[in-house]
Amino acid sequence: MKRALMFAAALLAAPSTGQAHPDHAAGAPARAVVTPLLQDEIEGGGAKEAALLLVTYAPGASDPVHRHNALVYVYVLEGSVVMQVRGGPEVTLKPGQTFMEKPSDIHVVGRNASKTKPARFLAYFVKDKGAPPVVPAE
């Protein structure tokens, strides 16, 4: 399962070495840095597991379009983030505010609302064991 979390980090994050993401073109926004915090089976949850990730957006950072094989609950810790799933409204979240995604949602907007300040949020996943937490989407 650590491999699935590493896939999520690779899909959404620039390497922690400070180097540009491989598909980060000159002038393109930076990607989020994803730090896995916790992953465990859900007791009595059958084939379900939980994962907790810390997502840090540098100023101007954004995510590619993606979806999750999970219910995802977001809690903003710092800064402001802009989120939108296909067919839903674009929302700007501030510290203490939340956002939820269903497994069928396509996450079309995920970015730092600020060009000058970082933003951080926790993402709590409830998913099938072994399912990758992040999947590219169009």
Image (cartoon, helix red, strand yellow):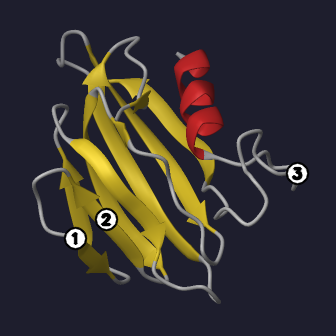
**Residue drawn at the location 60% of the way across and 48% of the way down:** 34
**Residue drawn at the location 34% of the way across and 13% of the way down:** 129
Mark 2 touching mark 3, by CB under 8 A? no
Q: Secondary structure at mark 3?
A: loop
Kind of residue indicated by mark 1: Glu
On the image, the x and y values in percent for residue 2 come to 59, 20
Sequence order check: which comes first, mark 2 or mark 3? 3
**Badge 3 is on which residue?**
19
**Badge 2 is on which residue?**
83
**Badge 1 is on which residue?**
90
On the image, the x and y values in percent for residue 84 come to 25, 61
Mark 2 touching mark 1, by CB under 8 A? yes
**Residue drawn at the location 58% of the way across and 41% of the way down:** 36
Q: Secondary structure at mark 1?
A: loop
Question: What is the distance, in whole Å, between disc 3 and disc 1 at their CAs?
Answer: 30 Å
Vertical arrangement, residue 92 with respect to residue 9, above or below: below
The quadrant in which residue 31 appears is bottom right
Sequence order check: which comes first, mark 3 or mark 1? 3
Vertical arrangement, residue 133 with respect to residue 114, above or below: above
Q: Quadrant of the C terminus?
A: top left
Kind of residue indicated by mark 2: Met
How many marks the image carries: the answer is: 3
Kind of residue indicated by mark 3: Gln
**Residue drawn at the location 10% of the way across and 53% of the way down:** 87
Crowdedness near tag 1: few (<14), some (14–19) or many (≥20) residues, C-alpha within 10 Å = some
Question: What is the distance, in whole Å, between disc 2 and disc 1 at their CAs?
Answer: 6 Å
Q: Nearer the viewer, residue 127 or 7?
A: 7
Q: Is residue 60 visible?
A: yes
Q: Secondary structure at mark 2?
A: strand
On the image, the x and y values in percent for residue 123 come to 39, 51
The quadrant in which residue 8 appears is top right
